[in-house]
Image (cartoon, coloured by chain):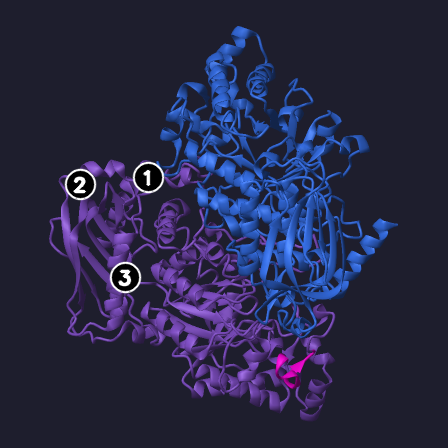
Chain colours: A blue, B purple
Amino acid sequence: MQNHYIVFAFLLTFLVHNSCALWPRPASVTSANDTLLLSSSFAIHSELKTTPSDLQDAITRTKGFLKTDKLGRLVVGRGTSDIPTFKSAKSLPSLTLRLSEGSTVQSIANEAVANLSERQEGYSISIPSDGTAAIITANSTLGLLRGLTTFEQLWYMAGGQTYMIGAPMEIVDEPVYHYRGFMLDTARNFYPVADIKRSLDAMSWVKLNTFYWHVVDSQSFPLEVSEFPELSIAAAYSASDVYSENDVQDIINYAAERGIDVILELDTPGHTTAIGFSHPEHIACNLASPWSDFASEPPAGQLRLASPSTVNFTVDLMQAVSSKFRSQFFSTGGDEVNTNCYTQDSETQKELNASGLTLDEALNNFLMATHDVLRSGGKNPIVKEDMVLKHNTSLPNSTIVVVWISSDDAKAVAEKGFRIIHQPSDFFYLDCGGGGWLGDDITLNSWCDPFKTWQKIYSFDPLANLTADEASLVLGGQIPLWSEQSGPENLDSIAWPRTASAAEVFWTGGTLDDPLRNLSSALPRLHDVRYRMVQRGVNAIHLQPEFCALRPGACDLDA
Amino acid sequence: MQNHYIVFAFLLTFLVHNSCALWPRPASVTSANDTLLLSSSFAIHSELKTTPSDLQDAITRTKGFLKTDKLGRLVVGRGTSDIPTFKSAKSLPSLTLRLSEGSTVQSIANEAVANLSERQEGYSISIPSDGTAAIITANSTLGLLRGLTTFEQLWYMAGGQTYMIGAPMEIVDEPVYHYRGFMLDTARNFYPVADIKRSLDAMSWVKLNTFYWHVVDSQSFPLEVSEFPELSIAAAYSASDVYSENDVQDIINYAAERGIDVILELDTPGHTTAIGFSHPEHIACNLASPWSDFASEPPAGQLRLASPSTVNFTVDLMQAVSSKFRSQFFSTGGDEVNTNCYTQDSETQKELNASGLTLDEALNNFLMATHDVLRSGGKNPIVKEDMVLKHNTSLPNSTIVVVWISSDDAKAVAEKGFRIIHQPSDFFYLDCGGGGWLGDDITLNSWCDPFKTWQKIYSFDPLANLTADEASLVLGGQIPLWSEQSGPENLDSIAWPRTASAAEVFWTGGTLDDPLRNLSSALPRLHDVRYRMVQRGVNAIHLQPEFCALRPGACDLDA
């Protein structure tokens, strides 16, 4: 009954005056009709015995946004019609942060990199309208951070006043999926650290908790590895287009303080030509021509997975790189292994003949070796779906599988008993629709046409076609940005606000058949988070003419 | 024979060391193999009796770019392999600007807004490699500006030195088409003046000469008109989202000083709902629902073209607005007139019944009235193709027609004897491929799918299907950015470098069958101008992984 009341209250509030433009939508919101002003002396108090410095920093950021967001409400007049209500409104003097009884105080950063099932991102917010303090309660500092993020989204500016509507308000919230990510490819084109940090900021504003870093690929190797300095020296685009080990630690810490785990992907054995710039001995079909006979895109080249020296090199590289990351997860990739490359490589054929192994058997040994060293280092290996659907491997079910080729493949992965990260190209690939990028052809469209609109992304059902048992294998999902046609210049505009669309899918779960999950009620809230991102310096694009953003429903298909 | 030599020299130079990464490609380039350093005391001298202040400003900008571009050459190593040639290279001490004998000195700004056939954009550049001065010669300050723009593109940085390769070099250049434009829609979403100025900068770097400003539309009216202040007060998105009359003059002057004419479009009688915010009496089917019965996109509303009071209002508005622009051209638009809107509008039906006119006859009278006032003010009217192909009007052949629906329609427009501006949706629309933007539908793609790649844009043939006589009617063309899903956040990334692709089409003319116009030789030069734009603060996007940009041809289809 309580649940029904909450749902009804949310719907009523939303439909009546759209006061809860929160993204992602909290699990429950009860609200009324009072306006509440933010006191000019508004303060945020932590009740924690000791407040971790990263929680203190989060408090400082929230106070900053309350001052600098200055977002006019997305209605005709941008909130000027709210001004008459200010006269009788009370002011909110302060916000108290409270840990539930029995909770132990840890830094946000530590909680952000805990194992998935141990991450506690839930929180509740109580905002009275009588001039007494608001409270955020959670079991963890990570939960308090999520609550602060929600709190920030409640406030608008009109007539020089910072205010919210819909008070008193009670929010009880937690995510449905533990894994909610954004993937960035920094190999096809390079992104300076500042761009990655700005992306981490935007991610945290919509409560994404995983930055999946596809750091190197066939085109470049922009990662400094002190044990293998030759890799980035030979194959970064330039000496300045390198993530130093200090940069990496900086990114990991910056992310963790914002509740984000950084998972690195060292894609192997394919997508590794750049390693051949310094270690040609480890690369089959190295820069072979025509590339299309040997690889899915130029340049051709794959690790010689059947060569013991290459396996050893890869194991050492995996160990060196993975040891520098705090995350309990590490991806060895495994997409688009090109069989012809190995068939044509005399070195690989010689090794296979000598050992009597098939290519898939050699691949399996390669996986066992690289995954062993990861597990020894306390990491859970992640692979691409190819490794369990296209190749005959014996990966244990503790391996996590990224479903990318098609959303239809999730079923087969689940049937094999693997846990799933959804990253389907038919729903989530941000680069689709940008046209073919090969140089000399006018007829090519992108391979995964059409463009994935926010609506398409939002329509994704994480449990489609899965049984209840299989559903328990779904960890969550992530939106990827492949960078063949992207770089710092369009990072924000290609990623936002579409990435937010997926952030809600995995925070709330559910499908478009649910009463609280539909395009028409989502769009005004998505506009809101977009406009707020722009106020904060993230160049999220307009989804519609502003005329439409100010008039919910007016630009619907049959309006 | 001379021409053959020039062509051969250009090809040889280009293929051997890609020294001429000029965009748009000059009509002729002869070059050799010397490296030339830029003297640390490099100076630009004007030989003009009096140097107009805007030419002086252009000189200052060029000197600035020579210092700040700091572009590494787009080859593996980014030009470090050029450093050994510095030792024996001479330094260029200065550049002289010279007007041809008999030329009269005018400001760039005046020459930029002259009638099309009077604009002289040709120039020649001579760069010796023996340490003597370089010279740019032209018949006009506008030509000198174009020459400076070319000169800037020759220089790279390596080892702390600014240098060019391919000296000595002779360039003789002029455009094939007089009209080369970029169209911006500032009504669906608003762009601050700074964004427009940055676009004008980028336009000038690729020698575009027309900013076609679709300033208002059905969604908003962000143009201050002092005679009709109510229009922007009622229908701008906010008081700050308005181009004041000072802003407009600022934009016109900024453009003209960069060799760019600003042509305003007041789209009529459709696309005018925003006028109804303050003048509902002039709007038929004003905000009618469902919008799709009355308009091509929300909100519905068109000027009551059959009402004398509305005609008078429109004529007065046209006069007020057009008188503030220096251009000799002004567009009254005319696309997507919705017949059903007028059929359903009782006021319009009453007027038609009273006058005994058909709708097209009333439309024709409306056009005659608005065009008369433009002509009285010395403006040549421009209309959309609908006005001559879809409606039975009696526009004189002095009217200029924008072909936008399809490139195929150019033939029909030419057959009717009208001059043509190419703006075909099937080649040039920058917004295509971004997905449908109506709120509640997950299946819609953009109406003009797919995305128009730089290759597709570059493949446009301005004279396709036209006879020689008809060809003489082609003034040029322009790339439009419609802003339903665009704003300052993605202006650069959606427009550049694709807009440069069209800039070369109309500077050089020709087709992909010409020896000097092909995708493979264009791409390295387009990469170059893109990287240079980024150095100058315009967020032009990567067309390929940098791996490909440094290795011409390596990412071609069959490489």
> Is residue B282 highlighted in magenta?
yes
Residue occupying the point 40% across, 50% down: B513
Q: Which residue is mark 2?
A: B86
Q: Amino acid at mark 2?
A: Phe
Mark 1 Cα within 10 Å, few/some/many (few <14, many 20+)? some
Q: Amino acid at mark 3?
A: Arg
Separation (CA) of disc 1 from disc 2: 17 Å
Q: Secondary structure at mark 3?
A: helix
Q: Amino acid at mark 1?
A: Val
Q: Earlier in the sequence, mark 1 or mark 2?
A: 1
Most extreme residue toward the bottom is B354
Which residue is nearer to you in this view: A14 or A50? Answer: A50
**Which chain's residue wears label 2?**
B
> Is residue A118 highlighted in magenta?
no
Task: Please provide the residue range marked out in magenta.
Answer: B277-285
Q: Earlier in the sequence, mark 1 or mark 3?
A: 3
Q: Secondary structure at mark 2?
A: helix
Q: Is residue B173 visible?
A: no
